[in-house]
Image (cartoon, helix red, strand yellow):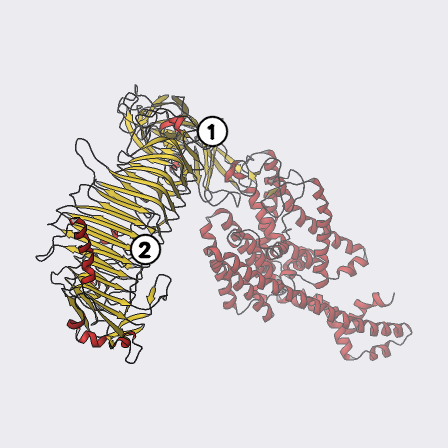
Amino acid sequence: MSTNVLLIVLLSLPLLVSTDEYYIIARDGDYCPSATGGVMCYTLSYYTNQFELYFTDDTILYFLPGEHSLDGLLTIKEISNLTLKGLGDIETGFHETVTQSTVQIRCTNNTTSGLSFQNTDYITISGISFVDCGAPFNDTVNFLSSETYTTMNFISSINVSLERVSILNGTGMGLLLQNTLDIEIKDSSFSQNVIPPCTQAILCPGGNLLMQYFDTESTNNFTQININILNSNFSFGYSTELYITGGLGIDISSDVSYINLNVILDGLMLHGNTAILSPNLYYHFLCSAGINYNIIINNTVSVYGNAINSLPSNKLDITQINSGGFFLMDESRNHSQSYLSILNSEFSHNTVSNYGGIRINSFTPLLRVRIENCLIYNNTGNIGSALNVFTSRSFDSSPVLAVMTITNLTVNKNSLINFNEPLVGTTLLQNLDISISGLIISNNQGTGMVALGSILRFTGSANVYRNNSGINGGALALYESSYIILKPPVYISFLNNWAENKGGGIFVGQLTYTAKNIQTTCFYQLPNDDYSYNNETLQLFFDGNRAGASGSVLYGGNVENCSSNIRFTRAFNYQTQTGNSVVSSDVVGFCYCINDELDCLSSRYTLTTVAGQIFTIPVAAVGQKNGITLGVLQLTDYTLPTPTITNYSLSPSCNDVKYRIQVDSSEQVNAKLYLAREGVENLVNATNNKLVEVSLEPCPPGFLFDRLQGWCQCEAILLGVRQVECNVTRQSMTRNGGVWMGYNNDSKCTYIQENCPYSYCIDSNVTFNILDPDPQCALNRSGIMCGGCAEGLSLKLGTDQCGDCSNGYLALIILFALAGIGIIALLVVLNLTVSVGTINGIVFYANIVTTNSIILFPNGPIPVLSQFIAWINLDFGIEICFFNGMTALDRAWLQFVFPVYIWILVITLIILAKYFKRVANLLGNNAVPVLSTLLLLSYTKIFIASIDVLNGTQLRCGSISTWVWYNDPNVNYNDPSHVLLVIIVSIFLFGFALPYTLILLFNYSIGLALNADKCHKCGCHQQRLSIRLAFETYNSPYKAPYTFWTGLLLLIRFISVFVVSFSKLDTHSPAMMTMLCVLIVLQAAFGGVYKKKALDILELWCLLNLAFIIVFGNRGTTTTIITSIGISLMLITFVGIIMYHTAIKVLETTRGQKLDSKLREYYKEKRNGKRIDAVNKLDSDTRDRTVSVTSIELNRRETLLTSDFQQEAIVRSHKSRDSTFEAVFTNKYTQ
């Protein structure tokens, strides 16, 4: 009975306590609900000015809706049971995470106004928003920066309750609680509380909410801390103080009290906060006396946290330890037991430099972590971008691991800042005993899960690793003796994961290869007491996993020699995974590669080589299950008395190991090589080693054994050539320029010729086997010095090119025949002869260009322009076939056919003119000039062809020396077919070409010798006239003293051909320029050599053009351009000459028709006896024209040899006008 009475009394005590109530209005004159009771309402400033009267024990202050102004810092000390209650509604603010009351306390100054509660008890605030506040915080223990500001703070208080409170846009920290016990915050909102203007940017406390606990002299003995925060939001806070978060933080540091902490966070939203260590949610414990905590985080969303990554260089580099979504750092080492539960929560879109979603760092193994029904996605970090849990490990005799439980956790689409870090795990777990069920890790950049020194206990069927990518281990990486325990029923899927290096599915990093008689613990086990399983209740399934280097399913683990209570093939299902490296490890041994297929059964490999030749051994390093891997191959060579060891780093594929053998003697015929892992010494008896047996052959053609080097080297004859290199590995030579090499199988010696004929050989680098020298040849040529055509091909006209020809091209004979007639007709009709002098310079130009075609046309003929030059030289000029099987010897004969053919045509016409008047009238007086012109046109062509026929070269092969024809070294110089051609050419050269040149050069002296007096005495007058007529053609354009000019130009041609044929290429241009300069200087010194100044100018133009292309055309890449410009200008000049001769011909034809009409009338009257009248009818002008026309050819051929000869010709030509008419025209007009 007494007990019941006491209980009733105790329950009634609060009812007996009187409570003061006040209503606060926003503005004077606002509605006051207490006025009806006789109590007046005032604004906030009224009460704060007398706060000691109104902010007292057992007081309730009601704030009516509206904006209440707070001016200055309101400090409330040592009171109990104070309530500040807003009587308004709650509305949504500027962001979905922000709520605010219609009752607002807005500070007049955000750096001097705020609230401070010190040593209070039972403080309740509800339904009020605090906006734009902030006042300096007086930190008596210097635990915070001197520049700390807060909107509201509680110091050493108990029983603080905030409900439907919002603290917005404050300077510094929104709410600070120091050494405050029993805190409850519900349905509240904290947003945009940011750092004040600080002098030191990294020491500026800010953020939304911070709870701090630390030892002070006046601190209560806090052994029990209870914190409940429910359905509240923390957004857009900002802090740069090291241990102060932008969102919600708890910091406990104590050396005195053993603390028991209970924290419940339920229904929180942490959004877009910014700080150094952990932007959104941060716990830090440093309690040397000890701490036990039970933290529950439920229905919480932590998103868009942003860690500050840049700090001054003189500060701690905390970018390596920050975290975005949630960070618990427990540095306390004295624990009995602590618990952390994260339930039904989401951590996403957090961006930090290291740990993105959740980071738990505890220095004690006495921790129990539970993560259940959570989502961690789209976070960006580096090591543990989604989840990182680290606990210290006990190293006692019976080690203790912290316990962690993961149930229904999804980790998706997390990414890395630096993919190349060594441990780039999406989830990183260290020193933990983890029970896992319903884990889905997918689409992450970075290994799905990295375990260090941990045990992973899998159970259930919904464990999936999908589409993850890492360096070592795409899905799962195990380090520091981590292993998996599979508790049936269990099913783990590894799907489409990728490892840039090793282990597309799983990478086991700590286990290395061991011998078969040494057993290690497998990284996969069953529980010790559970042996009841089958393939339906236990399976690790792999499909679509890939690795850049080795082990698409598994790398490491030593599954062949480890000890487990379940067989590897029963637990691992990877039948759909294909390739040469599905399961592998560090190198165990080596396999040969035969046609890209592994041959791991063969222990020997044989090959044949020569000493010094680099050969390849197709080999792959393999790990467990013969999966290809990367590793070091140790090759030991026992060929020499001292074994040689060479190490090779093998890529994870079939490798071509390159090696060459060095021997003491060329008589050695075999060698042995051993392949083993690095460091293996007993090679002969060691397991997993391979033997390579090598057979040695003699040095190949072109090589000799070098005892000093111990292998085959180039023959001495080849080493002496600057442009030749040898490669015994490929058994090939590389040569450049005009060098040609070959091998004589009969004599067993090597040909070498440093000057390949013409353009027969490729000028650039060519690599070939000396037994097959044809790759050196250009233009489809073949044979010795590329002198012939490849098999089945024929030499073409107009080029050195060989091609596929048929006999149908013989129809070109008709075209050649017509071309000869056309040339003669053109020369006759237009009087394009050397006697006129207009084409003399152009003919010389074309002859010299043809002679120097090697330097002027380095890239081959130039369309149109090359044909123009060729036609002036009476050459075809077009690349075309003639008949099947044509050789260089055949073409040499054909070079003489066309010139001889047109000579014969002209001579035949001259003979026919003596007997047939029509032929004589057709030719007129041009027969001899045309023949002389054709001789001059064809002189260079035939002379070059003759030199080519006579040109030979000495072909050396060892001690054997053979003379061959230079144009086709496949033809011996003394071959009968070539000897016949040499005889005919010699007759031409010494019977015609040389005398022809000398006579034209010295015709002035010859003329003096053949004067009239001597010839009359010896009866040689008729022969003298014939010789005179032959030379008049060449001499008529020139002044009397310079009739040698044609012979001088022939001599220049003669010298040019010899220079080009028998000197080095680099001397051609200087020699030609010297001769051209001599010609130009002589012409200038003589004041011109032609009778007509225009002809001197025309020839000087040709010489200058020729000098231009020879000097400036020999410039490498610009040669073709310069040559084209010069020849184009000369083509235009030639066309102008043709037009000039055509105009003259038309003019002479018109005048001749008028004269013909008058002469016919004259002879008609003469026959009628009216001779005197008829003559008188011919006016003097007509008679003068008649004399001029009829005597023009005689005047052209007036001799310039002697004055007597000249007088005689004049007397014979001009006795009188009448006699001229009678002699010339009587026969024609009296018929």
Around disc 1, counting alpha carbons within 10 Å, would you say few (fewer than 14), some (14 to 19), or many (20 or more)? few
Residue 691 visible at all: yes
Percent x, y for residue 559? Answer: 34, 27
Is 756 located above or below residue 587 in the figure?
below
Residue sitting at the far top: 685
Q: Identity of the amino acid at label 1?
A: Asn
Of callouts 2 and 1, which one flags the residue occurring earlier in the amino acid sequence?
2
Q: Residue, x 26% and y 70% (percent of image)?
A: 62
Taking the image as shown, residue 211 lies to the left or right of residue 166, namely left
Give the secondary structure at mark 1.
loop
Question: For the residues marked 2 and 1, what is the alpha-carbon distance in whole angstroms?
Answer: 64 Å
Around disc 2, counting alpha carbons within 10 Å, would you say few (fewer than 14), some (14 to 19), or many (20 or more)? many
Q: Identity of the amino acid at label 2?
A: Leu
The image quarter in which residue 614 lies: top left
| Residue toward you, 262 or 584 | 262
Taking the image as shown, residue 863 lies to the left or right of residue 50, namely right
| Residue toward you, 257 or 705 | 257
Disc 2 to disc 1: CB gap under 8 Å: no
| Residue toward you, 1023 or 537 | 537
Percent x, y for residue 22? Answer: 23, 72
Taking the image as shown, residue 315 lies to the left or right of residue 814, namely left
All told, the count of numbered labels is: 2
Residue at label 2?
Answer: 268
Residue at label 1?
Answer: 595
